[in-house]
Image (spheres, grey):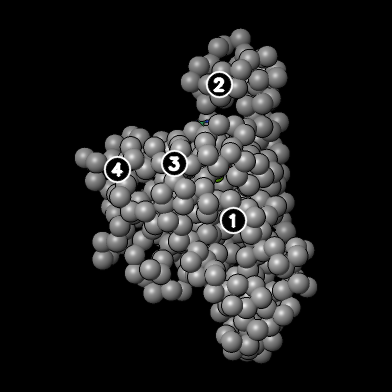
Amino acid sequence: MGKFGFEKLKLPSLRLPFLKRQTLSIGLDIGSHAVKICEMAETGTGYKLVALGSALLPPDSLEDGALQDPEAVGKIITSLVNNLKIKNKKVAISISGYSVIVKKINLATMSEEALEKHIESEAEQYIPFDIEDVYLDFQDLKTHAADDRMDVMLVAAKREVVDGYLNMLRTAGLQPVVVDVDAFALENAFEANFGLADNVALVDIGASKMNINIISQGSSILARDVVLGSRQLTEQIQNLFGISFAEAEGLKTGEFSPKEKQQELEILFANTCSQWVAEVKRAIDFYYSNNPDETISKIILSGGGAKIQGLLEFFEKETAIAIEIFNPFKQAAVDDRTIDPSYLKSIAPEMALAAGLATRPVEV
Ligand SMILES: Nc1ncnc2c1ncn2[C@@H]1O[C@H](COP(=O)(O)OP(=O)(O)OP(=O)(O)O)[C@@H](O)[C@H]1O
Ligand SMILES: [Mg+2]
């Protein structure tokens, strides 16, 4: 075992996408608002959706990507798995937040063994954490930018945070086999449905964070987490009208919409959604400044926040780029008799990460 425990990473690993496909695990997206689960099966020509569902989590279950109440979250996951009659115990999860560092580095071309040695001895210079405290993984991006240079993606995740998830899942009777990064899971879901499309910006708007991921010619050029999300709106609505969290959620999602509050709500939505758009524009501008000849053909919105009424049109107007709401099951076979089409349609945008995790190849 090397200093960084590479062997230990094999099960679970942070990301091992080039492994031979042998089986699929369950995709489990533990968000700060809800846990989403997705089971897929391979059909020979693609994927079939086997099961999916979500369950709300108590508001303080997660804090900046770290698990705060493992017992409560574990119980909710167990009952979700049972309700959906999921038998597979192998799960793939993803993490994000302050405890994860993703860094692209450019090195002189070297063999895989030399690369492993290099990372092992030089990781400290790339990562702002004590190396003893992190799980480390890397991947040759095989971009072949220049024959004598190579691009390598380096991922470091705080052991304490990762172990918190692993222990919770094991206690819940599950077997974690992959620990991925949210941005990669999103990218994986995109690839499964769009292949190597033009340059696009994937934007996942969750409850407490936004993930912006610019994909160019099939690989991620820029991935950014922003601490803004749909819970902001709920809290603002709570404060504005002096109502409970549940009531504010109802107002936000349009469950009830009293006329007298409409105008105030619209102003509040416009202000907050402007902040979101500004972040997306900033990322796109940054991309354009480095790639002046390229064009972003589409922004693909996912996450529960993407379901805010009128958001698509607002983004379209502000960015002048075509917007699409992400359907991560676009290419998957779905049996209407086992999965209600209207439920699927309404939950699809939130399921992007879980779907991306469910189609991640796993070594068994
Ligand atoms: N129809 C809707 N209109 C507006 N907002 C909605 C709607 N449906 C869900 N949301 C909001 O989306 C958020 C949940 O989205 P999602 O499940 O993607 O978040 P999460 O993954 O749990 O959070 P995060 O990724 O930030 O940790 C909640 O804030 C919820 O109120
Ligand atoms: Mg999320």
**Which image quarter holds the N terminus?**
bottom right
Residue of label 2: 246
Of the numbered discs 1 and 3, the one sitting upstream in the chain is 3
Q: Position of residue 21 (x, y in %)?
A: 37, 70
Give the amino acid at mark 4.
Answer: Lys
Left or right of 279, for residue 163: left
Q: How many marks?
A: 4
- Distance from mark 1 CB to nearest ligand 1 atom below 8 Å: no
Check residue 162 in the rendering and tell me which mark sits there, or answer none.
1
Disc 1 crowd rating (10 Å Cα; few below 14, some 14-19, many 20+) is: many
Residue of label 3: 77
Q: Position of residue 254 (x, y in %)?
A: 51, 22
Secondary structure of residue under mark 3:
helix
Give the amino acid at mark 1.
Answer: Val
- Distance from mark 4 CB to nearest ligand 1 atom below 8 Å: no
Check residue 85 in the rendering and tell me which mark sits there, or answer none.
4
Q: Position of residue 343 (x, y in %)?
A: 35, 35
Residues under numbered marks 1 and 3 in contact, where contact means CB atoms less than 8 Å apart: no
Give the amino acid at mark 2.
Answer: Ala
Q: Residue at x 71, y 39 (%)?
A: 275
Q: Residue at x 41, y 69 (%)?
A: 363
Secondary structure of residue under mark 1:
helix
Of the numbered discs 2 and 4, the one sitting upstream in the chain is 4
Q: Residue at x 33, y 53 (%)?
A: 88
Of the numbered discs 4 and 1, the one sitting upstream in the chain is 4
- Distance from mark 2 CB to nearest ligand 1 atom below 8 Å: no
- Distance from mark 3 CB to nearest ligand 1 atom below 8 Å: no
Give the amino acid at mark 3.
Answer: Ile
Q: Is residue 172 above or below residue 127?
A: above
Q: Position of residue 273 (x, y in %)?
A: 65, 35
